[in-house]
């Protein structure tokens, strides 16, 4: 919370980040019940701080957020934060590889206006809000569904 205050993060982004943390931990519970190890402290911190540079970024808030956090000594959190933007997942060094990387992207995509929603609902909002072309929309939706499969396929519990 101190880091959020340091950058004067908007209250709406703080609320979003708190909601993403809650959703990420709910999904972590499900994964852990199915034998998947999740670093809860890491995902909690990364979820709270994933949009730390949302308002001040010149290029990509995920990458710049990672740089900011790394500069504060939070290297492990920075690594997860910099990988949470769908627009960067095709970059080899920014592709999500750990459970925590994937969990942050997925939880972020499942939160809209402070509550958990389906991927369909969230992507409809993103399409309208950002004017995504049909091709870009479909590509990012397919990436999100792939992350969902990576996290939850072959697991006994439903999403």
Image (cartoon, grey):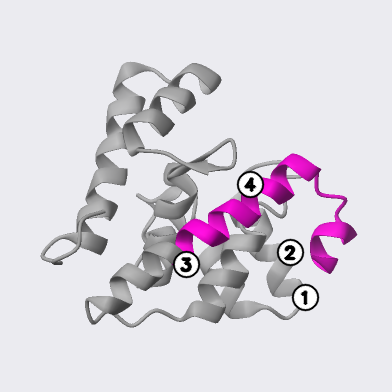
Q: Earlier in the sequence, mark 3 or mark 2?
A: 3
Q: Kindly identify the residue that appears in the image at 45 percent across and 42 percent down.
A: 87
Badge 2 element = helix
Q: Find disc 2 in the rendering and name its residue.
A: 68
Q: Find disc 1 in the rendering and name its residue.
A: 72
Q: Earlier in the sequence, mark 1 or mark 4?
A: 4
Badge 1 element = loop
Label 2 to label 4: alpha-carbon separation: 19 Å
Q: Horizontal and vertical percent for residue 25?
A: 47, 67
Please tell me whether the stretch drawn in magenta is mainly helix, strand or loop: helix
| Residue 63 visible in the snapshot | yes
Q: Assess whether residue 14 is covered by the magenta stretch.
A: yes
Label 3 to label 2: alpha-carbon separation: 24 Å
Is residue 84 or residue 32 the one in the foreground?
32
Horizontally, residue 1 falls left or right of residue 144, namely right
Q: Earlier in the sequence, mark 3 or mark 4?
A: 4
Is residue 158 or residue 48 the one in the foreground?
158
Residue sitting farthest toward the left: 154
Mark 3: few/some/many CA within 10 Å (<14, 14-19, 20+)? many
Badge 4 element = helix
Q: Earlier in the sequence, mark 2 or mark 4?
A: 4
Label 3 to label 4: alpha-carbon separation: 14 Å
Label 3 to label 1: alpha-carbon separation: 24 Å
Disc marking residue 16:
4
Q: Are marks 2 and 1 in contact (CB under 8 Å)?
A: yes
Q: Find disc 3 in the rendering and name its residue.
A: 25
Number of the front mark, 2 or 4: 4
Horizontally, residue 63 falls left or right of residue 146, namely right
């Amino acid at each position: 919370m101190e880091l959020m205050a340091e950058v004067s993060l908007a209250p709406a982004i703080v609320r979003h980040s708190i909601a993403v943390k809650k959703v990420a931990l709910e999904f972590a519970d499900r994964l852990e019940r199915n034998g998947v190890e999740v670093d809860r402290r890491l995902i909690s911190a990364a979820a709270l701080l994933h949009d730390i540079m949302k308002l001040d970024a010149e290029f990509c808030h995920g990458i710049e957020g990672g740089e900011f956090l790394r500069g504060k000594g939070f290297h492990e959190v920075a690594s997860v934060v910099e990988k949470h933007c769908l627009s960067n997942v095709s970059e080899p060094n920014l592709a999500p590889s750990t459970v925590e990387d994937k969990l942050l992207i997925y939880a972020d995509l499942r939160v809209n206006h402070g509550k958990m929603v389906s991927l369909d609902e969230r992507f409809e909002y993103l399409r309208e809000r950002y004017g995504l072309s049909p091709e870009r929309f479909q590509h990012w939706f397919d990436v999100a569904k792939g992350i969902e499969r990576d996290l939850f396929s072959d697991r006994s519990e439903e999403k």
